[in-house]
Amino acid sequence: MKKSIILTGALALAIGFQSCQSGDNGAQLAKDNAAIDSVANAKGIAFTDSLNNECLIAATTRGMEMGDSMVNASKKGGKGGSKTKPTTVVTPPPPVDPKKDKMGGNTQSSTDAKKDKMSGSGTNTNTDAKKDKMGKPK
């Protein structure tokens, strides 16, 4: 009895091993996988296209609604629309004479006046006059 159980198990093992060794299963499996992939890709593309079309239709209808409402508002006289702001005209500044000093056109005619100013000799310098105006001590 033990021999028959062992022989039956060995026979089943041999038959299973032989069925796995046939070369047709590998090629058939690749063909099946390619077919499954092509069907899945086709369904994915169809789904994406349907979503894109729905979005395009929704955007087009909303745009048409907004455009129609703007046209209707303009026909009614623009009630509730934005108000125009008055614009101010900016006049350009007068042209600057390059020969004059940038600080008001004061020029010093002699070098002696320049030397006096740099040495600090003078009754009241420009900064002292500014301090006097501000009320600060010298």
Image (cartoon, grey):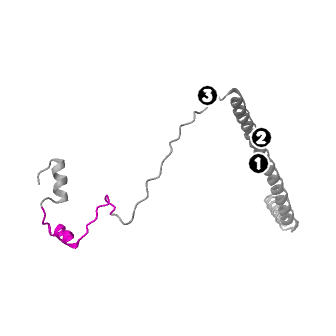
First-in-chain label (3 vs 1): 1
Label 2 element class: helix
- Compared across the picture, whether 85 is left or right of 99 comes to right
Q: Position of residue 89 (x, y in %)?
A: 51, 45
Separation of residues labelled 2 and 1 (CA atoms) = 14 Å
The answer to whether 112 is drawn above or below residue 74 in the figure is below
| Residues rendered magenta in the picture | 101-122
What amino acid is labelled 3 in the image? Gly
- Asked whether disc 2 touches disc 1, contact meaning CB atoms under 8 Å apart, the reply is no
What amino acid is labelled 1 in the image? Thr
Q: Position of residue 38 (x, y in %)?
A: 83, 56
At horizontal 80% and vertical 58% (from top left) the residue drawn is 5
Local packing at callout 3 (Cα closer than 10 Å; few below 14, some 14-19, many 20+) is few
Q: Which residue is mark 3?
A: 80
**Foreground mark, 2 or 1?**
2
**What label sits on residue 135 in the rendered view?**
none
Relative depth, front residue between 134 and 9: 134
Quadrant hosting residue 19:
bottom right
Q: Position of residue 138 (x, y in %)?
A: 11, 54
Separation of residues labelled 3 and 1 (CA atoms) = 41 Å
At horizontal 41% and vertical 60% (from top left) the residue drawn is 96
Q: Is residue 114 magenta?
A: yes
What amino acid is labelled 2 in the image? Ile
Relative depth, front residue between 21 and 88: 88
**What label sits on residue 48 in the rendered view?**
1
The answer to whether 47 is drawn above or below residue 28 in the figure is above
Label 1 element class: helix
Separation of residues labelled 3 and 2 (CA atoms) = 29 Å
Local packing at callout 1 (Cα closer than 10 Å; few below 14, some 14-19, many 20+) is few
**What label sits on residue 57 in the rendered view?**
2
First-in-chain label (2 vs 1): 1
Quadrant hosting residue 103:
bottom left
